[in-house]
Image: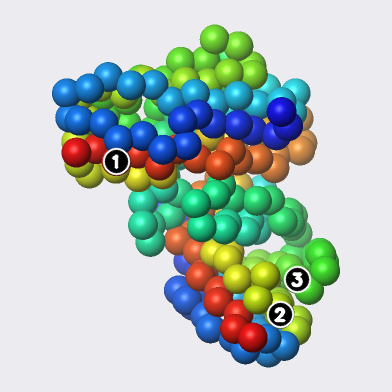
């Protein structure tokens, strides 16, 4: 595996379900990100982890719960979602702040549909 | 408030018809401007980083330029495979760390 991978690629869940999205990066980076992408809207930053510590929770509802067990893995735990949460969820990684190189590399995304 | 605006929202070109995409920004302290390409159903793919006014970067048919208030992505003699959404993002320092603020993108369609 190379780059940033995400599973599952597609997910349909009911409003009362609990599910998790997984992201793994194979680039040796130490910062990871969750973004939400809705149709015709800019990418919205949800969470940032640097060296496995969360440094940003961008006013995201508590029904989204991130977890970063190590610098290569990132999870997004979902529970009691709303239909407006349907979107493409993207994971990205980069070298951490202060190291100069800051290009973020993205995974393919998980297309989430909440019914 | 930090803001990134891309125009046009959508652009249709004939193969070989050169054009430019615009990204204008208002930020308090630019720390880099990034261009990405996104194909349908995929994540954004990194293209360029620009750091200072006057800087230019090229890759195949694409050339990115930067001024103090905007960036252009010039597409020379485009091919149908250049069809994608092109995203612009600026890096700012906010809340004690660096983060990217994205524009809504320009959807480019190149027809044979």
Label 3, residues with CA under 10 Å away: few <14, some 14-19, many ≥20 = some
Q: Mark 2 falls on what kind of element? A: loop
Whether labels 1 and 3 belong to a single chain: the reply is no
Quick one: label 3 or label 2, which is nearer the N terminus?
3
Local packing at callout 1 (Cα closer than 10 Å; few below 14, some 14-19, many 20+) is some
Identity of the residue drawn at 58% across and 38% down:
A107
Q: Which residue does the numbered mark 3 point to in the structure image?
A: B62
Name the residue at 39% across, 21% down.
Answer: A20
Name the colouring of the figure. rainbow
Mark 3 near mark 2, Cβ–Cβ under 8 Å? no
Q: Is residue A104 above or below residue A48?
A: below
Q: Residues within 10 Å of mark 2 (few under 14, many from 20)?
A: many
- Residues under labels 3 and 2: Cα distance? 9 Å
**Where does residue B82 sit, x and y in percent of width and height?**
66, 70
Q: Position of residue B31 (x, y in %)?
A: 66, 48
Residue indicated by mark 2: B78
Q: Is residue A55 above or below residue B53?
A: above
In front of the other: B28 or A3: A3
In which image quadrant can residue B20 be found?
bottom right
Q: Which tag is nearer the camera, tag 1 or tag 3? A: 1
Q: Position of residue A35 (x, y in %)?
A: 46, 39
Do the residues under discs 1 and 3 have CB atoms within 8 angstroms?
no
Give the left or right position of residue A68, taking residue A114 as reference: right
Label 3 SS: strand
Q: How many marks?
A: 3
Chain that bears disc 3: B
Same-chain status of marks 1 and 2:
no
Q: Quadrant of residue A85?
A: top left
């Amino acid at each position: 595996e190379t780059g940033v991978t995400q599973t599952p690629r597609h997910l349909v869940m009911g409003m009362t379900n609990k599910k998790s999205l997984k992201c793994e990066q194979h680039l040796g980076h130490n910062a990871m990100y969750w973004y939400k992408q809705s149709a015709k809207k800019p990418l919205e930053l949800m969470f940032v982890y640097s060296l496995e510590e969360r440094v940003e929770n961008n006013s995201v509802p508590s029904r989204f719960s991130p977890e970063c067990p190590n610098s290569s893995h990132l999870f997004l735990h979902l529970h009691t979602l709303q239909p407006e949460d349907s979107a493409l969820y993207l994971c990205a990684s980069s070298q951490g702040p202060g190291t100069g190189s800051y290009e973020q590399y993205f995974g393919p995304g998980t297309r989430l549909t909440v019914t | 408030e930090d803001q990134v605006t891309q125009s046009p929202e959508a652009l249709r070109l004939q193969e070989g018809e050169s054009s430019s995409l615009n990204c204008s920004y208002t930020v308090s302290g630019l720390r880099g401007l990034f261009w990405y390409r996104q194909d349908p159903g995929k994540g954004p793919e990194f293209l360029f980083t620009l750091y200072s006014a006057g800087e230019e970067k090229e890759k195949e048919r694409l050339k990115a330029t930067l001024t103090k208030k905007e960036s252009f992505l010039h597409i020379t003699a485009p091919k149908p495979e250049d069809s994608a959404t092109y995203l612009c993002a600026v890096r700012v320092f906010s809340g004690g760390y660096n983060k990217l603020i994205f524009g809504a993108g320009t959807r480019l369609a190149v027809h044979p």
